[in-house]
Image: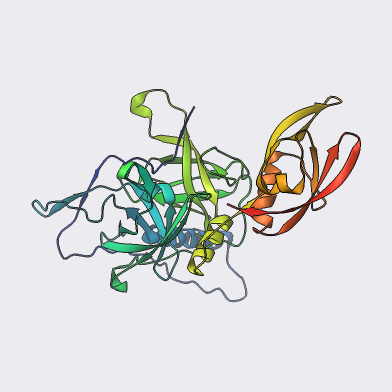
């Protein structure tokens, strides 16, 4: 099994052709409005209305999507009015010139270290190259936030909003991005497991049955209303033939609500952080049942008095059923510095232990 953070490597350079001094525009086809007095809309007209709304949502998401260029300038030579542009990842405009993308889609190597550059250049849907300045980034969540510079007339022609609702099993979703460095391209699919994990990031991920490739990283995952419900993070490569590698229908996205939390924190001039408990877990068998136990206590949990072999029972009166559930609770329902109460079983005795959470 190969886990590929899909914007980590450069995609295949895709030729993008346009003429100088021409701005290409996408036009929406707006159907005539039909007013029916007393009888209401027929099912066919209602379906048409829903289809038109979906088409507009897709078009707006396409216009809001940008390509992440690999260097501070394209450094391409114009030959017979053609430019070949390399794109290494995707990003999306969430309004007011703010671009959100995956941290690993913009990282570069400097002095043997992976760093998030102060400035990047992005390519808009109508082929404008625009500089953007870093506002903040978070390794824990693999998110980077940038602000576009220059004339607002050069910015993406649209933006998207974060959804206020979480996605769940079977929800229809789509993404716009630059798979293998080409695009913008759209793919459609459904949510599989909205609560899964990979070793590439600390937060939970949304697993989607949707074609994604290298270069899709940082692109938006959107619902039927065109609202941002996630940020494309990785794929699990299932093909064995080298020629077929680079794309997969087993994709993973960062949950939109958690991405919004990072963005809001950064835009408020703060450093995004998530709660750290400091417990390393193991499964322990007790009376024919497997339970979560403490393998090692570090940081906050060590100071609070946890011991190896303690069995976790509950956190803030919420029963602990799995390590994923515990991690989700800490990430999504607590803040660094907050005190939580964990109930543990130590031998035959249950006891409550208060822990002041650390920060990632």
- Residue 132: x and y in percent read 33, 63
Please indicate whether residue 346 sits to the left or right of residue 59 in the image: right
Number of disc labels? 0
Please indicate whether residue 127 sits to the left or right of residue 348 in the image: left
Which residue: 28% across, 39% down?
A: 12
Q: Is residue 26 visible?
A: no
Which residue: 33% across, 64% down?
A: 27
Please indicate whether residue 83 sits to the left or right of residue 259 in the image: left
The image quarter in which residue 18 lies? bottom left
Examine the rendered structure and indicate whether residue 52 appears above or below residue 300: below
The image quarter in which residue 346 lies? top right
> Which residue lies most toward the bottom here?
37
The colour scheme used to paint the residues is rainbow
Examine the rendered structure and indicate whether residue 326 appears above or below residue 74: above
* Closer to the camera in the image, 273 or 211: 273
* Closer to the camera in the image, 273 or 38: 273
Examine the rendered structure and indicate whether residue 309 appears above or below residue 221: above
- Residue 69: x and y in percent read 29, 52
Which residue: 60% across, 62% down?
A: 164
> Which residue lies most toward the left here?
80
* Closer to the camera in the image, 113 or 265: 113
Which residue: 89% across, 42% down?
A: 350
Q: Is residue 299 visible?
A: yes
- Residue 333: x and y in percent read 69, 56
- Residue 281: x and y in percent read 69, 36
* Closer to the camera in the image, 243 or 311: 311
């Amino acid at each position: 099994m190969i886990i590929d953070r899909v914007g980590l490597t450069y995609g295949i350079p895709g030729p993008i052709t346009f003429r100088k001094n021409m701005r290409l525009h996408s036009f929406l086809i707006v159907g005539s409005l039909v007013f029916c007095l007393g009888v209401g809309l027929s099912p066919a007209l209602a379906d048409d209305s829903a289809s038109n709304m979906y088409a507009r949502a897709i078009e707006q998401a396409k216009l809001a999507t940008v390509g992440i260029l690999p260097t501070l300038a394209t450094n391409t030579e114009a030959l017979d009015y053609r430019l070949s542009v390399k794109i290494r990842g995707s990003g999306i405009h969430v309004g007011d010139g703010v671009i959100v993308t995956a941290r690993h889609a913009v990282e570069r190597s400097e002095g043997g270290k992976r760093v998030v550059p102060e400035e990047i250049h992005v390519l808009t849907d109508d082929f404008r190259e625009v500089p953007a300045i870093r506002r903040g980034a978070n390794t824990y969540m693999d998110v980077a936030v940038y602000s576009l510079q220059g004339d607002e007339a050069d910015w993406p022609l649209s933006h998207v909003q974060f959804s206020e609702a979480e996605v769940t099993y079977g929800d229809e979703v789509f993404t716009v991005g630059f798979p293998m460095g080409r695009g913008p391209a759209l793919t459609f699919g459904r949510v599989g497991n909205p609560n899964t994990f990979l070793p590439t990031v600390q937060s939970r991920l949304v697993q989607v049955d949707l074609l994604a490739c290298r270069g899709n990283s940082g692109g938006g995952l959107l619902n039927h209303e065109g609202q941002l419900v996630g940020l494309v993070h990785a794929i699990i490569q299932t093909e064995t033939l080298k020629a077929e590698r680079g794309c997969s229908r087993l994709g993973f996205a960062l949950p939109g609500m958690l991405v919004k939390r990072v963005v809001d924190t950064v835009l408020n001039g703060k450093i995004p952080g998530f709660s750290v408990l400091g417990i390393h877990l193991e499964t322990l068998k007790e009376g024919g049942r497997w339970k979560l136990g403490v393998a090692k206590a570090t940081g906050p949990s060590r100071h609070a008095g946890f011991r190896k072999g303690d069995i976790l029972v509950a956190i803030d009166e919420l029963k602990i059923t799995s390590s994923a559930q515990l991690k989700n609770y800490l990430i999504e329902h607590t803040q660094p510095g907050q005190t939580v109460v964990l109930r543990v079983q130590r031998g035959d005795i249950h006891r409550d232990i208060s822990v002041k959470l650390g920060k990632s």
